[in-house]
Amino acid sequence: MSLLVIGSVAFDAIDTPFGSTGKIVGGAASFISLSAAMLHNQVGLVAVVGDDFDFNFIDSLKQRGVNVDGLQVKDGEKSFFWHGKYHMDMNSRDTLVTELNVLGSFDPIIPESWQQPDYVMLGNLSPQVQLTTLSRLTRRPKLVVMDTMNFWMDIAMDELKQVLQKVDVLAINDEEARQLSGEHSLVKAAKKIQAMGPSTLIIKKGEHGALLFGEEQIFFCPALPLEDVFDPTGAGDTFAGGFIGYMARSGSNRFQDMKKALLYASCMASFCVEKFGTERLQEISMDDVNNRLEEFNKLIRVD
Ligand code: AMP
């Protein structure tokens, strides 16, 4: 089952109350594809970077088994750059800088061998690019999952609503769900957002876990309680990568399997926050993932 991932591959700079980074590798699709490729072996990436990018990172994606035929490198141009600053609670943050650079004119060219993917993860990107990506697929995928953020709600709400009509699952955080729906109650927000298109909605609540809203059911999965959260950047993308990676591996699009996918998603996200950027995701093994899944099972099991 092939899984196409599209999203930003970027440089980030992160400030937390406990330390700051210079420019490090980030971007939604970097986290998604590292996470998904941990669980599934047919992951293809469509993205764009400038010639200033860190190409060692691209090598490590390849080593993880990610197909990068759809990665464009723009000579003489700069990669997307995002600078974020976390508040003391590490759950909320401010965006200090967003420089679109190569993303501003990104034309998502999908290699021919990836034009009929079974699963698609539309990572955080301009809704226009997300729409173009879907229009270039030559067959309706089995499952399309989408992420977005307040930045796009502020500047491209109309296009965002068009993408929503074409996807099966939307994965956003609680603040974004409230902004998109205009509702404070997450249950009411979910109903409104599901009426906009996606039959399934995932609302991520950071350290407080995630809710999965189906057509008639709601499921909840906690986040693993961790002693130290070092850098939450990319946790949402890593979560989405774990979710769709598991769905692609299982070959399913059923709600029942999405519950288990949520567990894998939370498990993958718990690694992401342990170090800055993609560092922790790059070093973990499948044994680490299995051990952590066991911790999750203990956390939620009632004998
Ligand atoms: P998350 O912490 O999961 O919300 O995702 C953080 C990642 O999103 C960072 O690595 C950023 O590079 C990326 N990002 C931030 N703003 C944007 C944007 N407007 N478009 C695409 N990617 C973004």
Image (cartoon, helix red, strand yellow):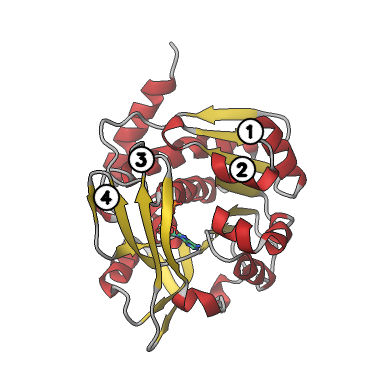
Q: Residue at x 73, y 37 (%)?
A: 191
Quarter assignment of residue 67: bottom left
**Which of the two labelled residues, at mark 4 and mark 2, occupies the earlier sequence position?**
2
The quadrant in which residue 154 appears is bottom right
The residue at 56%/53% (across/down) is: 150
- Against 222, residue 231 (above or below) is below
- Quadrant for the C terminus, please: top left
What residue sits 47% from the left and 72% below the top? Answer: 100
Mark 4 lies on residue: 280
Residue 298 place in picture, x, y as percent: 37, 21
Q: Which residue is mark 2?
A: 177
**In 3D space, how far apart are the residues under numbered discs 2 and 1 (Cα atoms)?**
7 Å
Q: Is residue 301 visible?
A: yes
N-terminal of the pair, mark 4 or mark 3, is 3
Please state which amino acid type lies under the numbered disc 1.
Answer: Leu
Q: Which residue is mark 3?
A: 90
Residue 292: image x %, image y %?
32, 34
Query: What is the C-alpha distance between the residues marked 4 and 3?
Result: 18 Å
Please give the label number shown on residue 186: 1
Q: Establish whether ligand 1 lies closer than 8 Å to the Cβ of label 1.
A: no
- Give me the C-alpha separation between circle 3 and circle 2: 19 Å
Instruction: Give the secondary structure at mark 4.
Output: helix
Q: In terms of sequence position, does the residue under pointer 3 or pointer 2 come before the other?
A: 3
Circle 3 or circle 1, nearest the eye: 3
Q: Closer to the N terminus: mark 2 or mark 1?
A: 2
Q: Residues within 10 Å of mark 4 (few under 14, many from 20)?
A: some
Query: Residue 241 location, x and y as percent?
Result: 46, 51
Q: Cα distance, mark 3 to mark 1?
A: 21 Å
Q: Which numbered disc, 3 or 1, marks the residue that appears first in the sequence?
A: 3
Q: Amino acid at mark 4?
A: Arg
Q: Quadrant of the N terminus?
A: bottom right
